[in-house]
């Protein structure tokens, strides 16, 4: 069908009966199922896939796999798709990304001429001054970004995450990883085997006919083993403390995160082939030996017609055999194992035309293959604390010391024929299984009530050595070429960084950005170290690698974000609110009615008739036991011993630094039974606080705490006619003022529902009853109260009306009128601080604050012009001095419908907070207004006649 | 994500717990001085190495635990229920 496709190859992955049509830069192309985007394009004669990051040089296939820096393309809406890895799918719309105006002609290629502006550190050197031009620089530089385009209109994808608990997790599904997985499984371990490619097999897949039988056998065994979960097209992205391992499962363009806790991790990541640094090493037509073997054996694509091979190892030799078998003319083989043989430069304009070898000899070719050595992807080992060691004899870094729960297997450790690699993997897997099962048994023993697991034989297996084969140290030739293809960093750039004083590799890396592109140094990292070492006249051992950090391979943000699973809480009456026109407001985790149309009218109706508010989010804690009073005495600042059965008391809780962190009321319902309410946001915090003191300081006290916030629906019935209303629906309780006075609580039956708790308290400042109802009956009681009060003028009110009424009454809200520095005296509750108690939380700080006087105080404030409502957080200033000084701020402000004027709470420096003082409030627009400090916090009914009636 | 072996629940991920910081002992309230009290509130050893710290198994058994952890290696050497010791 196309000129570059070879006849059927023995191990090819393509299905020649399944034709796949797709588009490349708007032109129709064809490929086969099983092709990658890159192999289909290469079969169709495409040579240039991208333009390079800085110099916009044309780039072609380099490695033909996931790590190919030159094969980033856009597929539909998805940018940065790796064309050497992504499988072709019908109808794919593939485009080159970041090219301008087109892949064939990129205007920015002129950079090659002005390249000196793009030297290392060019951002620091070039685009700093003048400052007035920085936004222009930014606009132009944006154009140079290599990334593709996303369409903001694309609907978001929600990538769920999952957890996994394998005994052994094997990273890498080549022969060593497969053998390790099988051996661990035979030992009784549950195994997760993760492979980056679409199929297991690693280098055996493209190893030619000899590799096929061992691969088939390993695959058959894995297939038959139910204890091995295989994840292909997936990658282990990171290893964290205690073998917490991130795995990214890919499904085409979708990614899902697997969070695995592995008892033992086996790293069988193999080896990554390293490019060679020489002039022209990025010309299309210059490839690594692995790319050639992949193209021929996996996809039956001829990578060129006339080839020069520069080889120093068996991978290059295998590529020669593959090329010959494919009928490519091998013009010249430069055996770099012989010192007389040198690769000098690749020559060509836009694509390879000839290769210059030792002695200035030029050979015409459209394909140059290099095989000069390996990088060991030690990333996961680094993350486990290992510092890899450079072995000059093998010309690569090798694993050093590993922790007990991490093992390395196969090519990352050493070299050998397939049988040796498999053998090594088998031993490692066997030992990994033992270690994992030992941990499993230990964890089982440590789990109370768990079934004991079988004991594991304790003897460890000696893992045979897998020595690394000798290899000449080949990093850079006599000419200058690219060290990092993704970032367009040359050997001379690294050398310049050294000359400028960046003698540490870690600093030179950041300065030149070598290894900091999307390939993360997997290809060029060791070359950068070698070039740096040469420029600094140091050894590679002394220079060391840069740190590999997670993620091993890029992860989409969507996979990390996962699905939004924040809980949202609704009261049992929520549906009623929706049906009755409530405007909702998000209050912490809760969705609450803010108002039902007109909060002012809701206030006036409550103050003159009766209103009802859904208070279900209130924190509620059931306290039982003989020593509850002691606990209350400790966590609240005031005194609780005298609280008799049937009484309710208000209290303020302070942390050990004296700062107010919650407030609420607690009722004593029976001798040993109490009912505590907290702020809505503080419910969990207070419960934890009580348990912390009980467990850590008072473990002998007889107190049981139970959080019952969701167990009770709560509603506050407030207003002068609230008693009349409640009398119609409540039974087994005397609601008369004499027997059920203010600050009392009773257990009663309401609308036929037994075990309701009624607290007569007054956050709104009105005669009011907080009715707590077993949650399942919440809506019934709510509806019954509304029905029973229709002739009394009952109407629901929302959060906003409640906020207005509490402000009219001068009640502060923790977190609104107080902050993380507001101690109890500052909040104006000094009368509730009983420092003659032996001990309570925060006592020393409050004692000292009382003695020295609070530096600031909470005051009620009324603007002189009552029509102006200063916005919350308006500054209060002392403008008597030349430069006006901030002396406080407005913490709450509203227009009071009851008083017909604006009212505020404010925190001010103590000397300014005397009753009757006039202060200056600076509005956000800059205008100053005058406001008067009241003698107390209360704007409405300071005598509390409404409340106590 | 660490594994903390809760004495009541067994090995659990550390995100089930909340971390309450280094263990510090509360001075005697009757005799304490501002210096001593504020050392208790704010001054931490921040050791590089073994550290006794308090964790709360908030999404598990709700017990408060004393955990001995190596802050360099994250090795957890012991986990005890605070109340067992305090009793």
Image (spheres, coloured by chain):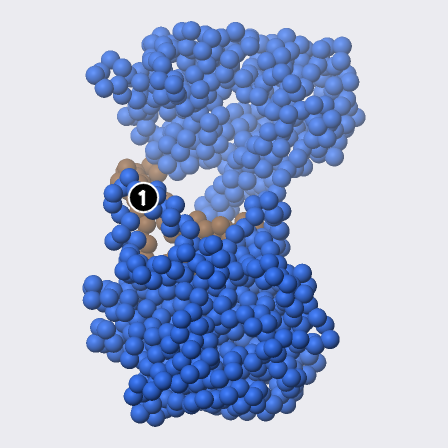
Instruction: Please name the color used to draw chain A.
Output: blue
Q: In the image, A897: left or right of A874?
A: right
Task: Pinpoint residue A870: horizontal percent, then vertical percent.
Answer: 43, 16
In the rendered image, is residue A509 in sight?
yes
**Front residue of A427 and A318:** A318
What's the residue at 65%, 68% (across, down)? A30
Q: Chain of mark 1?
A: A
**Front residue of A919 and A45:** A45
Task: Pinpoint residue A156: horizontal percent, then vertical percent.
Answer: 61, 48
Task: Pinpoint residue A771: horizontal percent, then vertical percent.
Answer: 67, 25
Tell me the crowding category of disc 1: few under 14, some 14 to 19, or many 20 or more residues within 10 angstroms, Cα based. Answer: few
What's the residue at 34%, 90% (across, down)? A341
> Is A827 rendered above or below residue A391?
above
In the rendered image, is residue A369 in sight?
no
The image quadrant where one finds the N terminus of chain A is bottom right
Image label count = 1
Quarter where residue A775 is shown: top right
SS state under label 1: helix
**Front residue of A603 and A309:** A309
Chain corresponding to brown in the figure: B
> Is B29 rendered above or below residue A759?
below
Residue under numbered circle 1: A134
The image quadrant where one finds the C terminus of chain A is top right
What's the residue at 47%, 43% (across, down)? A693
What's the residue at 31%, 16% (across, down)? A912
> Is A79 rendered above or below residue A727?
below
**Front residue of A67 and A140:** A140
Task: Pinpoint residue B67: horizontal percent, then vertical percent.
Answer: 44, 58
> Is A675 rendered above or below residue A87?
above
């Amino acid at each position: 069908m196309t000129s570059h496709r070879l006849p059927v190859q023995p191990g090819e992955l393509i299905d020649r009966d399944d034709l796949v049509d797709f588009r490349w830069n708007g032109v129709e192309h064809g490929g086969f199922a099983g092709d990658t985007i890159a192999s289909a394009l290469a079969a169709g004669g495409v040579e240039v896939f991208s333009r390079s990051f800085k110099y916009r040089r044309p780039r072609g296939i380099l490695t033909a796999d996931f790590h190919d820096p030159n094969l980033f393309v856009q597929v539909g809406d998805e940018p940065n798709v790796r064309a050497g890895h992504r499988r072709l799918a019908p109808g794919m719309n593939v485009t080159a990304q970041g090219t301008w105006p087109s892949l064939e002609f990129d205007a920015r290629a002129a950079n090659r001429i002005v390249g000196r502006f793009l030297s290392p550190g060019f951002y620091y050197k070039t685009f700093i001054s003048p400052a007035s031009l920085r936004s222009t620089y930014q606009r132009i530089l944006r154009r140079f970004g290599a990334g593709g385009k996303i369409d903001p209109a694309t609907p978001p994808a929600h990538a769920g995450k999952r957890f996994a608990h394998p005994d052994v997790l094997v990273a890498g599904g080549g022969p060593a990883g497969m053998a390790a997985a099988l051996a661990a499984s035979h030992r009784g371990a549950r195994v997760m085997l993760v492979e980056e490619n679409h199929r297991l097999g690693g280098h055996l897949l493209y190893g030619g006919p000899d590799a096929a039988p061992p691969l088939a056998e390993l695959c058959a065994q894995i297939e038959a083993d139910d204890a091995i979960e295989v994840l292909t097209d997936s990658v282990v992205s990171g290893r964290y403390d205690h073998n917490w391992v991130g795995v990214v499962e890919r499904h085409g363009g979708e990614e899902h995160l697997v969070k695995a806790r592995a008892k033992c991790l086996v790293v069988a990541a193999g080896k990554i082939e390293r490019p060679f640094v020489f002039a022209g090493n990025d010309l299309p037509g210059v490839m690594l030996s692995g790319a050639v073997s992949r193209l021929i054996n996996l996809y039956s694509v001829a990578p060129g017609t006339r080839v020069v091979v520069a080889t120093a190892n068996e991978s290059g030799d295998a590529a020669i055999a593959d090329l010959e078998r494919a009928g490519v003319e091998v013009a010249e083989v430069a055996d770099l194992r012989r010192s007389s043989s040198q690769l000098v430069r690749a020559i060509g304009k836009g694509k390879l035309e000839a290769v210059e070898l030792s002695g200035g000899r030029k050979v015409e070719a459209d394909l140059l293959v290099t095989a000069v050595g390996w990088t060991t992807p030690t990333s996961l080992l680094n993350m486990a604390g290992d510092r890899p060691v450079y072995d000059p004899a093998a010309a690569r870094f090798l694993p050093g010391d590993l922790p007990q729960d991490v093992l390395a297997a196969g090519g990352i450790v050493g070299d050998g024929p397939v049988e040796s690699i498999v053998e090594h993997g088998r031993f490692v897997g066997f030992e990994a299984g033992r270690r994992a099962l030992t941990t499993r048994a230990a964890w089982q023993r440590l789990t109370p009530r768990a079934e004991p697991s079988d004991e594991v034989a304790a003897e460890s297996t000696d893992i045979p050595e897998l020595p690394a084969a000798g290899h000449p140290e080949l990093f850079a030739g006599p000419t200058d070429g690219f060290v990092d293809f993704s970032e367009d960093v040359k050997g001379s750039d690294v050398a310049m960084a050294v000359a400028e004083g960046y003698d540490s590799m870690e600093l030179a890396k950041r300065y030149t950005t070598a290894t900091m592109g999307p390939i993360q140094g997997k290809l060029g990292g060791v070359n950068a170290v070698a070039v740096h070492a040469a420029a600094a006249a140091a050894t590679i051992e002394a220079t060391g690698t840069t740190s590999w950090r997670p993620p091993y391979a890029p992860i989409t943000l969507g996979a990390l974000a996962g699905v939004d699973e924040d809980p949202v809480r609704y009261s049992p009456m929520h549906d009623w609110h929706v049906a009755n026109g409530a405007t909702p407001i998000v209050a912490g985790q809760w969705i609450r009615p803010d108002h039902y149309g007109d909060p002012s009218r809701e206030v006036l109706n409550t103050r003159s008739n009766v209103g009802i508010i859904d208070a279900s989010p209130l924190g509620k804690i059931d306290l039982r036991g003989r020593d509850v009073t002691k606990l209350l005495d400790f966590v609240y600042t005031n005194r609780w011993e005298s609280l008799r059965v049937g009484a309710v008391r208000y209290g303020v809780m302070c942390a050990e630094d004296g700062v107010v962190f919650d407030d609420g009321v607690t009722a004593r319902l029976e001798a040993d039974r109490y009912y505590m309410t907290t702020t809505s946001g503080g419910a969990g915090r207070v419960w934890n606080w009580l348990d912390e003191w009980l467990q850590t300081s008072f473990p002998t006290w007889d107190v049981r705490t139970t959080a019952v916030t969701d167990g009770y629906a709560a509603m506050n019935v407030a207003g002068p006619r609230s008693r009349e209303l409640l009398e119609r629906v409540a039974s087994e309780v005397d609601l008369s003022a004499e027997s059920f006075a203010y600050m009392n609580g009773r257990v009663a039956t309401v609308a036929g529902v037994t075990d309701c708790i009624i607290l007569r308290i007054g956050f709104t400042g009105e005669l009011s009853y907080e009715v707590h109802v077993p949650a399942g009956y919440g809506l019934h009681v709510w509806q019954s109260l509304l029905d029973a009060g229709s002739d009394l003028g009952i109407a629901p009110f929302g959060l906003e009306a409640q906020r207005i009424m509490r402000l009219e009454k001068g009640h502060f809200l923790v977190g609104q009128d107080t902050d993380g520095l507001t101690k109890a005296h500052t909040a104006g509750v000094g009368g509730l601080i009983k420092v003659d108690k032996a001990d309570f939380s925060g006592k020393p700080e409050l004692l000292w604050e009382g003695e020295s006087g609070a530096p600031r105080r909470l005051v009620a404030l009324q603007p002189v012009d009552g029509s102006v409502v200063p916005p919350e957080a308006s500054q209060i200033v002392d403008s008597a001095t030349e430069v006006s000084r901030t002396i406080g701020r407005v913490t709450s402000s509203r227009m009071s419908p009851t008083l017909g004027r604006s009212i505020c709470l404010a925190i001010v420096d103590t000397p300014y907070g005397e009753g009757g003082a006039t202060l200056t409030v600076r509005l956000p627009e800059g205008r100053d207004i005058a406001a008067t400090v009241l003698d107390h916090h209360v704007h409405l009914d300071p005598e509390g006649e409404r409340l106590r009636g | 994500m660490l594994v903390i072996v809760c004495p009541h629940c067994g090995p659990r991920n550390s995100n089930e717990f909340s971390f309450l910081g280094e263990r510090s002992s509360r001075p005697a309230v009757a005799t304490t001085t501002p210096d001593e009290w504020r050392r208790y509130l704010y001054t931490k050893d921040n050791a590089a190495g073994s550290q006794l710290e308090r964790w709360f198994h908030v999404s598990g058994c709700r017990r408060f635990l004393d955990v001995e952890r190596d802050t360099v290696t994250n090795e957890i050497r012991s986990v005890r229920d605070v109340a067992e010791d305090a009793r």
